[in-house]
């Protein structure tokens, strides 16, 4: 399936379907998965990146195992709103994934997600070494939680209409 919007996702998801959050880095892919009620993001272990075909296979296996219906992927927009090389790399990754799966991908502005994730881990008194291991999944959780909160808002608004 093609890239979708959060508004389209709000109308197409059913209760009990899971949504994944992805934080695409150059060395790892941070992953988080929602609960059945799509209220909370739960981090999963990061995937170590090797080459696209291996990364895609491992990611798709995980998404199938978790029964994920959609994936929200962080779009690393620059602080001034411009799109740099990392945005282009993320979009290329999604274009290649679209050829392999029907799972829709939703881009989500991830500005400051890693900063927020790092602060949360520091607040939980996670050591520097363990923060390095967990930061990408924590960032994926932050990205996913923002999308889940938006989905709840959109659904609430549509029920009031």
Image (spheres, rainbow, N blue to C red):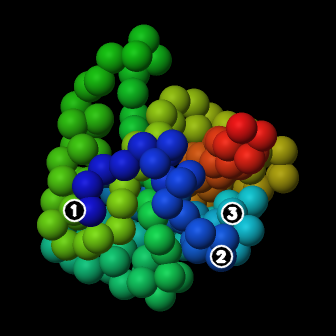
Quick one: which residue is furthest to the bottom in this view?
65
Q: Residues within 10 Å of mark 2 (few under 14, many from 20)?
A: few
> Can you see residue 55?
no
Separation (CA) of disc 1 from disc 3? 23 Å
Q: Which residue is mark 2?
A: 16
Answer with mark 2 or mark 3, whichever residue precedes in sequence.
2
Residue at disc 2, secondary structure: loop
Q: Residues within 10 Å of mark 1 (few under 14, many from 20)?
A: some
Camera-nearest residue between 108 and 134: 108
Separation (CA) of disc 1 from disc 2? 23 Å
Separation (CA) of disc 2 from disc 3? 8 Å
> Can you see residue 78?
yes
Camera-nearest residue between 122 and 68: 68
Residue at disc 1, secondary structure: helix
Residue at left 33%, top 17%? 82
Q: Which residue is mark 1?
A: 98
Q: Position of residue 117 (x, y in %)?
A: 66, 44
Camera-nearest residue between 16 and 23: 16
Q: Does 44 sit left or right of 5 as displayed?
A: right
Residue at left 56%, top 52%? 10
Answer with mark 1 or mark 2, whichever residue precedes in sequence.
2
Q: Position of residue 31 (x, y in %)?
A: 51, 64
Tell me where residue 59 sits by quadrant. bottom left
Q: Is residue 54 above or below residue 110?
A: below
Camera-nearest residue between 121 and 88: 88
Q: Which residue is mark 3?
A: 38
Label 1 vs label 2, nearer the camera: 2
Give the position of the N terminus as an image quadrant. bottom left
Q: Position of residue 70 (x, y in %)?
A: 45, 64
Tally of marks? 3
């Amino acid at each position: 399936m093609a890239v979708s919007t959060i508004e389209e996702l709000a109308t197409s998801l059913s209760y009990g379907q899971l949504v994944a959050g992805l934080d695409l880095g150059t060395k790892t892919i941070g992953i988080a998965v929602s609960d059945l009620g799509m209220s909370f993001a739960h981090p999963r272990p990061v995937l170590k990146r090797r080459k696209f075909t291996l990364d895609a296979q491992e990611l798709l296996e995980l998404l199938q195992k978790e029964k994920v219906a959609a994936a929200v992927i962080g779009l690393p927009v620059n602080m001034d709103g411009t799109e740099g090389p990392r945005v282009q790399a993320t979009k290329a990754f999604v274009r290649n994934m679209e050829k392999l799966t029907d799972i829709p991908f939703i881009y989500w502005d991830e500005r400051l997600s890693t900063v927020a994730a790092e602060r949360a881990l520091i607040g939980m008194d996670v050591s520097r070494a363990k923060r390095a291991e967990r930061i990408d999944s924590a960032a994926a959780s932050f990205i996913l939680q923002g999308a889940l909160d938006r989905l709840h808002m959109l659904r609430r608004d549509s029920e009031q209409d």
